[in-house]
Amino acid sequence: LARLAPALAWLGLVATWLEAGLRLLAFTVSGRLLAPGGPRGAAVVLSLTPPTFLTLRSLLVPHSAAPVLLATAVPHWLALTHGATAAVLLAWAAPAPGVAVGTKSPVAVGRLLALAWAEWPVLGGAFLFLALAVLGETAGPYCTGKALDAIRRGDGLTIFTVGLVLAADLGSSLFAGCRGGLFIFAQARLKLSTCHQLFSRLVRQDLAFFQGTPAAELSVRLANDVPLLCRAVPSSINIALRSLAMVLGLGGFMVGLSPRLALLALLEVPLTITARKVYDARYQVLQRGLLDATANTAAVVQEAVSSIETVRSFAGEEEEERRHSRAVAEMLGLKDRIDVERALFILIQRALQLAVQVLVLCNGHRQLREGTITAGDLVTFLLYQGKVGRYVQALVFGHGDLLSKAAAGHKILEYLDKEPTGVTGGTRAPATLRGHVAFQHVSFAYPTRPEHLVLQDVSFELRPGEVTALAGLNGSGKSTCAALLERFYEPEAGEVLLDGLPLRDYEHQYLHRQV
């Protein structure tokens, strides 16, 4: 390519993109042969980022000294383009801490959307007011810029101009309030329905589930995780859609005012996305850890308080204090890490935004001196840029917030999708029941200790009209027989018969009224 550079120089940017196509072909073939498990999209990013950068530079600074072909570039140009591309790739492909590369994300966004679909009438009204608010907020700075141009020309302010500005601002405020109110209403309804579904699913789980899950943890999940999960869809989608509409609308106005300044302001988008990508990867893991630590702390307190007699009899007060201190320290440590990383992220985000604003202001001042843009248009553009910067950050935040809250509420989704392992009951409900019970070669082990058989090949009968006493050592299975008769558990082998029929054939409520 270096030998062909003089012949291709007259093509300009076309030659740059031809070179990018050849690089893409070479990177794709070599990547599949040498590193089949490499980052997805790496060849595209490595090939298209340099020509995109050179194209934007030529549009913003027409007489710059950017090379036509990278093959003929000096070393510092290669270091600049390849270094920036490598930094973007590393930031984008960085896995979340504690998550192996290539593992599937546990976040089920589709599951969240299906959960919120029941509130579609309220959400539909909220989206309508969202569109109206975006129209009003987009028209506000445009009307303000036209008013400034009229003042600069000496025409003065007219009632019509002032009315347009007021109508745009008041209309956007009114519609934004209606939009926010409907989203809050949808969030409250979603929280109520999710709590009801979750509690209904929990009370129907097998006893083995409750033996392995502390009651305090379930209470904390209901109190903390459900509201967090229910805020994910209405709140995050509200922020994301509103920001997307505003970015597209305001971006169109910015391109119409000054394409060169719009391209320069566009630099904020990849910088914001990259910074947010790195932050969200860590935040999701830390937030899930914080919720788990909160549930663990509540479980420690509940275990100590509910078994205070046992704790006192073994003089275990100090040990329980140490357990509680460790749990609280872990929870506070995670909280501090979240706060510190959030502060650093906000600092970096503000610095990037300020740098782009300074570049736009300097370039706008030069265009103002050249006469390619008016003062009113420049003020309008700067107003739009400030809004677009905030909405780009909000858009990226809405996407990351949706994933973070969904990841934090993964336990709630697991509980909602968890089906009881045993069948609740059959359909038989005879009018009379003799009460003849027979254990036939029953073997059973509790789910928490599957290797220890409490009952092994046990057979006996309980005849109607007789009182039968089960005698044995502590832990020999007396209470287990009663639990199997009440069908709290299913035997691993053998059958428990009632009037000659297996217990699973009887209707659930009928069986527990009779036994």
Image (spheres, helix red, strand yellow):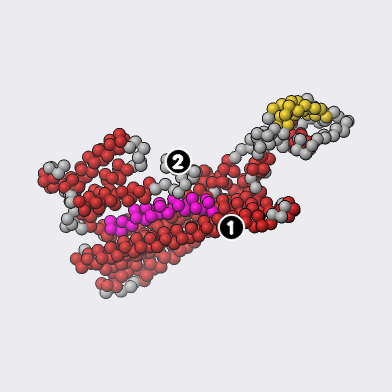
Q: Which residue reaches farthest left?
A: 6
Residue 341 rendering spot, x and y as whole percentages: 45, 58
Q: Residue at x 16, y 47 (%)?
A: 72
In the foreground, 121 or 419: 419
Which residue was labeled with disc 1?
328
Which residue was labeled with disc 2?
103
Q: In the rendered structure, which disc, 1 or 2, sits on the residue that comes first in sequence? A: 2
Label the magenta part by its dominant secondary structure: helix
Viewport quadrant of the C terminus? top right
Q: Do the residues bearing badges 1 and 2 touch, measured as CB atoms within 8 Å?
A: no
Q: Residues within 10 Å of mark 2 (few under 14, many from 20)?
A: few
The reply to whether the magenta stretch includes residue 272 is yes
Q: Nearer the viewer, mark 1 or mark 2?
A: 1
Going by the image, does 367 lie left or right of 338?
A: left
- Magenta range: 262-290
Q: Which residue is drawn at 50% across and 54% down?
A: 235
The residue tagged with tag 2: helix, strand or loop? loop
Whether residue 204 is visible here, answered yes or no, is no
Amino acid at pointer 2 = Thr
Numbered mark located on residue 409 in the image: none
In the foreground, 213 or 236: 213
Amino acid at pointer 1 = Val
Residue 156 rendering spot, x and y as whole percentages: 30, 74
